[in-house]
Image: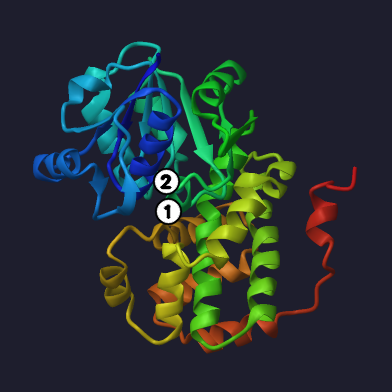
């Protein structure tokens, strides 16, 4: 029975630990705070981050880092903490142990994808990326979910074998760049659809933002080396749909509050968990400038978040842009070939 460690006991880490334990694996769920992990051990529930989901008997909540010496370690920490976490766990990992990153973001400052950060810090471990439309609240309750794991082929297949269950279908994809960028950049668009909802706009507006947002994601993603077809898959349009529409989405909820006129600091405090789209907006905005890629939605999101621009004015500026042909991006990226 493969031994698996999940590092990070938030909602997503806990849901994946539950999933893996139900699949018959021996799972260590490793958190930072001894009192919280002891409470989880006693109550068999993560009441703070995943209330109502029972922890199976094969799941051990712990702070013991020696249990990272496993066949597979799942990283479930916010994107800004990935490098620090990798440095912390490095002495405990077995050589060749597969590290699966589940955070959806990029590193500020370096603009590195998170798999690149992990490869830098953990050169003796194969790295895979798990992404796709998958809210912890639903995965923890065995609702049918499909995701994608991206890595070198044999590594991806090994992760697929260990994680796939009757309620959690795992596809493989060798396009690590595209899978990571799709997962990171969709958070920007989810913030925007939330802002539109907070402003009182309807389904037409949200559909427009999602559709043109996907074109924007793919435009930058392909420029950075991703396969255009990946953005039509689970980590692209799939994750975009669920993050822009679900009540579970922190990015959407944060956007709604911003659209209603609340200050960013207040919104982040009220959400109480990491809103990846805020950092992603700043990174995507800078990457668009660096690579000379037009990203009008991201540009307006940046102005609203960091330059105190009026959200209604931002929508007006998007609507009044110069005339375009809808399929220009498609033709430029040879999607029709």
Question: For this rendering, which residue is in front, 19 or 102?
Answer: 19
317 relative to 250, above or below: below
- For image coordinates 30% across by 59% down, the residue present is 273
- For image coordinates 44% across by 61% down, the residue present is 277
User: Is 145 left or right of 50, judged from the image as shown?
Assistant: right
Pinpoint residue 228: horizontal percent, then vertical percent: 73, 44
Identify residue for label 1: 137
Question: For this rendering, which residue is in front, 15 or 253?
Answer: 15
Give residue 306's quadrant in the image: bottom left
User: Is 291 left or right of 54, judged from the image as shown?
Assistant: right
Identify residue for label 2: 140
Give residue 101's quadrant in the image: top left
319 relative to 276, above or below: below
Pinpoint residue 70: horizontal percent, then vertical percent: 32, 17
- For image coordinates 12% across by 39% down, the residue present is 38
Q: Are marks 1 and 2 in contact (CB under 8 Å)?
A: yes
């Amino acid at each position: 029975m493969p031994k698996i460690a999940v590092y990070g006991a938030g909602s997503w880490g806990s849901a994946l630990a539950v999933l893996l334990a139900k699949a018959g694996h021996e799972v260590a769920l490793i958190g930072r705070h001894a009192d919280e992990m002891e409470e989880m051990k006693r109550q068999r529930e993560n009441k703070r981050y995943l209330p109502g989901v029972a922890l199976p008997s094969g799941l051990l909540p712990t702070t013991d880092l020696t249990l990272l010496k496993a066949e597979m370690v799942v990283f479930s920490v916010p994107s800004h903490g990935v490098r620090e976490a990798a440095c912390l766990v490095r002495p405990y990992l077995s050589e060749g142990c597969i590290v699966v990153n589940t955070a959806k973001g990029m590193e500020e400052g370096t603009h590195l994808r998170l798999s690149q950060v992990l490869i830098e810090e953990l050169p003796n471990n194969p790295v895979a990326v798990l992404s796709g439309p998958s809210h912890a609240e639903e995965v923890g309750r065995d609702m049918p979910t499909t995701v994608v794991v991206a890595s070198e082929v044999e590594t991806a297949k090994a992760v697929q074998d260990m994680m796939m269950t009757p309620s959690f279908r795992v596809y493989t994809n060798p396009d690590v760049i595209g899978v990571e960028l799709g997962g990171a950049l969709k958070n920007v668009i989810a913030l925007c659809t939330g802002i539109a909802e907070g402003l009182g706009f309807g389904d037409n507006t949200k559909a427009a933002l999602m559709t043109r947002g996907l074109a924007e994601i793919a435009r930058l993603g392909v420029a950075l080396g991703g396969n255009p077809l990946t953005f039509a898959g689970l980590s692209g349009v799939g994750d975009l749909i669920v993050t822009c529409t679900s009540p579970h989405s922190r990015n959407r909820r944060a956007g709604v509050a911003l659209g209603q006129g609340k200050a960013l600091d207040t919104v982040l405090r009220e959400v109480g968990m990491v809103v990846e789209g805020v950092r992603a907006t700043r990174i995507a905005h800078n990457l668009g400038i660096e690579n000379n890629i037009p990203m009008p939605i991201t540009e307006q999101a940046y102005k609203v978040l960091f330059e105190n621009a009026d959200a209604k004015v931002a929508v007006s500026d998007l609507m009044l842009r110069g005339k375009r042909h809808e399929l220009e991006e498609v033709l430029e990226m040879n999607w029709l070939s």
